[in-house]
Structures are given as C-alpha cells and as structure tokens.
Image (cartoon, grey):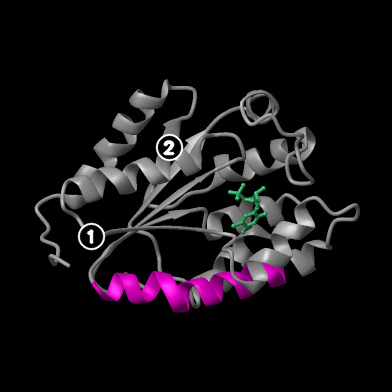
Amino acid sequence: MNSRKHTPRGLFIVVEGIDGTGKTTLARDICRRLESKGFPAVFTFEPTDGPWGMILRRSFSAPVRLTPEEELDLFLKDRKEHVKKVVSPSLEQGKIVVCDRYYFSTMAYQGARGLDPEEIRKTNEIFAPAPDLILLLELNPEAAIQRIRESRGELPDNFEQIEYLERVTLIFKDLSDQSIARIDAELPPQELLNSAWQRVSDLLGNRCFPVL
Ligand code: TMP
C-alpha cells in the first residue's frame, strides 16, 4: 500500500541537491517569481531555525559529529514540527510552498552515513506531505566544494567533506520519484532559473489559486 500523504490543496515544490549547488538562491528566486506573478507563495527551509534545527546547525561545526541515529532523530523531529507549523497549514490555505531541502536530503545525507535510505523514506512518508515537484540540482562534488570555498569564502563544515559528498551524490543519483526533475547546476544562474521555472509552469498549468 502506498502510504504517501497527498497535498490537500496548494502546491508543494522542494529544491534538493548537495551543498554548493545554489539551491537556496534558486528556491528564493522561484518564490519571488511566483509572487511577482500574483501567486500566493511561501519560502521555507530545512533544517529550520526552530529548536531542533538550531541543535542540528550547531552540530555542523562541532568538533565531534553526532551519530547517524542522533542526526536522523533530530532531522525527523525538526521536520515534524516544520510540517505541522508551516508546510501543512500553508498547503491547506492553498499556497505554493517552496522548500529548500526536505526528506530526500535525509535519505541522501544520513543514508551516506550508513542508514538505509528506503527506510528513511518510509518513516518520512508516514507524516510528511509528498511534494508535487522536486527540483534536484546536480553538480559533481569537487565543483561543489570549490564553490563553497571560493564563492562563500567559508571553510567546508562537517557535512561538506569530499568523500562524504560523493556518497551523498550517489544516493541522490539513485533516487527515483515520479516528481523529480533533474537540473544541471553548472548552468549559468539565469538559465538555471529558466530551466527550473519551465518545470514550475508545467506544474501550475491552468490551476487557479486563492487571492490572499
Ligand atoms: P543547508 O546548507 O541547506 O542549510 O543544510 C545544512 C546541512 O544539513 C547540509 O549539509 C545538509 C544537511 N541535511 C542533512 O544532513 N539531512 C537533512 O535531512 C537535511 C534537511 C539537511
């Protein structure tokens, strides 16, 4: 039996990919473009800035990394709260939710630490609404690390190590989901946005949204 929960009314768009792919910029740009065209859009992200998300963010640069099980537990707690407080209420109000990372990141990142990605998917599908569109940005891990060092002027954190990102990339490559659209993150920013926007407009079709 398919345990996936379906979006009640609005639309749910998720942007995924390894660190350094430009996911956050793309998610924000899509949200802005939706708003400029009069659609009721909400930008959101995971890990959130709620209590569980903050524990996770602090752990990214801690000298000792949490165990995979501890990490999984915190990401699930953070997501449950996020779904309850932001994602589901916004979808129920008919809004278009654009989320920077979701449970495909948990499958890939905690899967890359030895947990079973399919088990992680099943656990999430019990409570997390299924996205209508997953924009999956693809970039090789060397280029991603290079971008983190150069453009962000930051040292890579615990999650941004090459061997780890290689394992994460393999899981993202293997993901299969009817809603996935793979996009080449090496495209220049404007082309990247246009390519993603094409998928978003296909999804919007002739649907009507409430004026809020
Ligand atoms: P961010 O760079 O998109 O803010 O995400 C912070 C880190 O969190 C990133 O390295 C990926 C990691 N992450 C997981 O390991 N599992 C998850 O479920 C999510 C949402 C993020």
State which mark lies toward you, 2 or 1: 1
| Residue found farthest to the right | 63
| Type of amino acid at the residue the image marks with label 2 | Arg
Q: What residue type is labelled 1?
A: Pro
Q: Is residue 28 placed above or below 52 in the rendered structure?
A: above
Q: Can residue 1 be seen in this view?
A: no
Q: Front-most of 115 and 27? A: 27
Please provide percent x and percent y for residue 140. 61, 27
Nearer to me, 123 or 109: 109
Label for residue 76? none
Would you name the residue on which mark 2 appears? Answer: 182
Above or below, comparing residue 160 to residue 85 in the picture: above
**Relative to residue 18, is residue 43 drawn left or right?**
left
Total number of numbered discs in the rendering: 2
Residue shown at the point (34%, 24%) measured from the top left? 191
Please identify the quadrant where the C terminus is shown.
bottom left
Mark 2 → mark 1, Cα distance in angstroms: 25 Å
Mark 2 near mark 1, Cβ–Cβ under 8 Å?
no
- Please name whichever residue, 4 or 70, is drawn nearer the observer in this view of the structure: 70
Q: Name the residue under label 1.
A: 40
- As for residue 51 lying within the magenta part, the answer is no
Instruction: Residue at 20%, 45% (x, y): give it.
Output: 36
Mark 1: few/some/many CA within 10 Å (<14, 14-19, 20+)? many
Mark 2 or 1 closer to N-term? 1
Prevailing SS of the magenta stretch: helix
Q: Give the range drawn in magenta.
A: 72-93
- For residue 109, above or below residue 51: above
